[in-house]
Image (cartoon, rainbow, N blue to C red):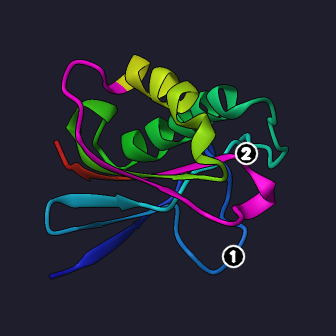
Amino acid sequence: MTKERIQTPDAPQPIGPYSQAIRAGGLIYTAGQVALRPDGTFAGGDAAAQTHVAVANLRAVLEAGGASLDSVVKTTIFLKDMNDFAKVNEAYGEYFGQSAPARSTVEVARLPKDALVEIEAIAIVE
């Protein structure tokens, strides 16, 4: 099986030795996305606002690889504080409401750039 690196200027560039996403075996595996803008500045805001930026980044990476939010089959959400679950869930639902993928949500001690939320996805290549 071959693997292909996916890279787009429409999402933040990696801040370490990893790829924005990898396409392998008909699937795209994204790196976790936080509320970094493509220019590398941190968007900030509350957990809901950060969710919108993280999903916009996921969308850009997926589209660069030939997929879309509709082709996502699994996401993992990492939260700094599980008390933000309802806010994040509401924002997330604006993008994944109709055909919601499988999902895990976990609370973590700290995220890159001290973000409140990070989201990663697995999608079928269309």
Measuring from the top left, give residue 93's x and y in whole percent.
39, 22
Residue at the image position 63 percent from the left and 27 percent from the top? 48
For badge 1, the amino acid type reads Gly
| First in residue order: circle 2 vs circle 1 | 1
Q: Which residue is mark 2?
A: 36
For badge 2, the amino acid type reads Leu
Is residue 101 found left or right of 69 in the rendered image?
A: left
Check residue 16 in the rendering and tell me which mark sits there, or answer none: 1
Residue at the image position 18 percent from the left and 26 percent from the top? 99
Within 10 Å of disc 2 (Cα), the crowding (few <14, some 14-19, many 20+) is: many
Residue at the image position 69 percent from the left and 42 percent from the top? 35
Disc 2 is placed on an element classified as loop
Depth check, front residue: 47 or 73: 47
For the view shown, which residue lies furthest in the right direction? 41
The boundaries of the magenta stretch are 96-120
Instruction: Please check the rendered image and state whether residue 41 is part of the magenta-colored stretch, yes or no.
Output: no
Residue at the image position 33 percent from the left and 33 percent from the top? 69
Check residue 76 in the rendering and tell me which mark sits there, or answer none: none
Is residue 45 found left or right of 80 in the rendered image?
A: right
The vertical placement of 115 against 29, above or below, is above
- Whole-angstrom CA distance, mark 2 to mark 1, is 14 Å
